[in-house]
Image (cartoon, helix red, strand yellow):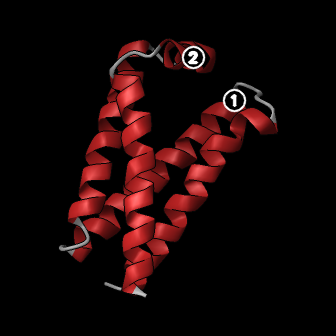
Amino acid sequence: MFVLTVIFTLVTAAVFVAAGLSKVQGVKQQQEIAAHLGVPWDRYRQIGIAELVGAAALVVGLWAGWLGVLAALALLVLMIGAVVLHSRAHDSAQRMLPAVGVGVLTLVTLLLRVATN
């Protein structure tokens, strides 16, 4: 089961690195999403930094199990927050799907990390 944990951890970390980098780099689409959600750009960039730190902690957490659990939990809370923001913006299910999908991926990673800790 640890092999499955490693796979899910690396995939989840890669997803958060991609998302975090696009926010930190100020990709136009991310700026538009931030404006749509009503989040000030500097705060949205901070979310990107949190995603990058969380991704790094997930990977390091493969050696320090407690850190992997905490990182996955923190990233899951971040994704729940994303779903809440999209709901408040009255987004369609299709616009909310990436946040929900990444949230489910993060939940599976968290459960695997707890099971193999």
Label 2 to label 1: alpha-carbon separation: 10 Å
The residue under the point 44% across, 56% down is 12
Quadrant into which the C terminus falls:
bottom left
| Residue 4 tag number | none
Which residue corresponds to mark 1? 88
| Residue 38 tag number | 2
**Quarter of the view holding residue 38:** top right
Q: Which amino acid lies under the numbered mark 2 shown in the image of this protein?
A: Gly
Task: State left or right for residue 114 relative to residue 37.
Answer: left
Q: Residues within 10 Å of mark 2 (few under 14, many from 20)?
A: some
Q: Residues within 10 Å of mark 1 (few under 14, many from 20)?
A: few
Decide which of 29, 88 is in the foreground and name it: 29
Mark closer to the chain start, 2 or 1: 2
Image spot of residue 23 (x, y percent): 40, 25
Decide which of 4, 41 is in the foreground and name it: 4
**Quarter of the view holding residue 5:** bottom left
Image spot of residue 52 (x, y percent): 30, 41
Task: Find out whether the residues at labels 2 and 1 contact each other: C-beta distance under 8 Å.
Answer: yes
Q: Which amino acid lies under the numbered mark 1 shown in the image of this protein?
A: Arg
**Quarter of the view holding residue 94:** top right
Task: State left or right for residue 14 relative to residue 94.
Answer: left
Compared with 46, 60 (above or below) is below
Image spot of residue 53 (x, y percent): 26, 45
Label 2 SS:
loop
Image spot of residue 16 (x, y percent): 41, 45
